Amino acid sequence: MGNHEFDLGTGVLGGLISGEAEGEILGADFAGTNFPYLFTNLDFSTDENLAGLEVAGGQAPQPNSVTSSTVIDVNGENIGVIGAITPTLGSISAPGNVGISPSPFDTNPTAEQLDALARAIQLEVDALLAANPDMNKVVLLAHMQQLFIEEGLAERLQNVDIIVAGGSNTRLFDENDRPREGDSIQGGYPQFITNAGGTTTALVNTDGSYKYVGRLVLDFDGDGNIIPESYDPEISGAYATDDQGVADLNAAGFIDPEIQEIADAIEAQIIATESNVFGVSEVFLNGNRSGEIDEPLDLDGVRTQETNLGNLTADANLAEAQEADPTVVASVKNGGGIRASIGSVVVPAGGTEAVRIPNEEIVVDGQVIKPEGGISQNDIQTTLAFNNGLTLLTLTKEELVAVLEHGVSALPGVSGQFGQISGVKLSFDPDLPEGDRSDF
């Protein structure tokens, strides 16, 4: 589970896990989750909505529950699976009274903070292995928002064979993988890292929003250690989930009818919201997360630079605020609140390079439901998915400077705190010390 599951509070989250939430799925009453959610660095006992769902770690998967770890039987062999979430959860979501460790933990954590997080995870690893003497394979499901944190954990942990990273949307590919049109390659799949025990940990990550499905097939030696040379890019990697990806696998005939029923229901809702058009743009509106991680000059996204979509949404916030109070002079929003671009990335017929274009016309059953360049309800809800509230604050000059400095303090890292602003101009130098990077 990631940080966004907590966005509506632990009451909503608890109801979804337990099945108390209202609703139906596939014609039956929603019964909650058929699996546990895993967090070894959270304490649920202090939160009234989740405390009753907590079960002891190290068991077989329990439905409708939260826990620290689970043990899965794979062909008669026990595999330990542990979960961990970013310790910054309290500042980026709404975890209620859930205890979070370690604390403090910065967006760009210090080596000491990474050490503390690794210790918290290692305790669960050691407990799992002690309770299961025959177990020699452990997987960590991590949601740390920034891949370098999972990389740091891989170096610090022992007896963790695979880390499935999450939250950063970092696109890792091997030499046999095909990125979707417009997607850049941001690293190799998998990353093999020497861990604290002197063996190898495999780290994997793919992009979000179901754009890719990752597959990792590896051999282990008799002691349960990964054999990196066993990795085969013909079998493993990040598989694109677009039409071409399905065709490449000859998988069109392997459609699960229940999944298709769910997809059809979602499609009907999308058509309804796509036809509700609020405006038109003649250009691609850039809500990308970031550019090439390994290319310091490619800061193509709302978490690293000013973009036209960042400007549009910040300007809209300022205009709305001035309707309530004409004396409002500036708007600041976090780039992490912008979740998608508005437009398409395509390779034109006869071309070789992807280009960015406004939204294409959408026609369903011969009827135009969205014109070329149209900005629909669906676009807005996808881009501004969290429906964050707009707050009016009175700040001193010094306080405003501190807010803007915070927005650029994570650079050159990719962070949702990067500010998209209106009503004020600034330049910044990411090579200067934090707190002294901006010029107004």
Image (cartoon, rainbow, N blue to C red):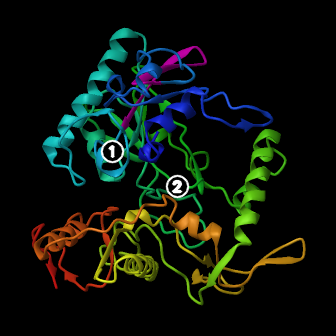
Residue 399 percent across, percent down from the top left:
14, 69
* Residue 247 x/y as whole percent: 77, 58
Q: Residue at x 55, y 45 (%)?
A: 232
Q: Residue furthest bottom?
A: 282
Residue 244 in the image: state x and y as whole percent.
72, 63
Residue found 23% across the figure and 63% down from its top: 410
- Residue 412 spot, x, y in % from top left: 25, 68
Residue 201 placement: quadrant: top left
Specify whether residue 73 is painted magenta. Answer: yes
Q: Earlier in the sequence, mark 2 or mark 1?
A: 1
Name the residue tied to disc 1.
89
Judging from the image, what secondary structure is the residue with disc 2 in?
Answer: loop
Which residue corresponds to mark 2? 208
Give the extent of the magenta segment.
Answer: 66-84
- Considering depth in this image, is 435 or 170 the residue closer to the camera? 435
Q: Nearer the viewer, mark 2 or mark 1?
A: 1
Q: In what element is the residue under mark 1?
A: helix
Dominant secondary structure of the residues highlighted in magenta in the image: strand
Residue 250 visible within the image:
no
Q: Residues within 10 Å of mark 2 (few under 14, many from 20)?
A: some
Compared across the picture, whether 379 is left or right of 103 comes to right
Q: Which of the image's four quarters has the C terminus?
A: bottom left
Q: Is there any visible trace of residue 129 in the rendered image?
A: yes
Position above or below: 230 against 269: above
Q: What amino acid type should be assigned to the residue bearing mark 1?
A: Leu
Pick the residue in front: 136 or 106.
Answer: 106
Residue 332 lies in the magenta-colored region: no
Above or below, 292 against 231 in this view is below
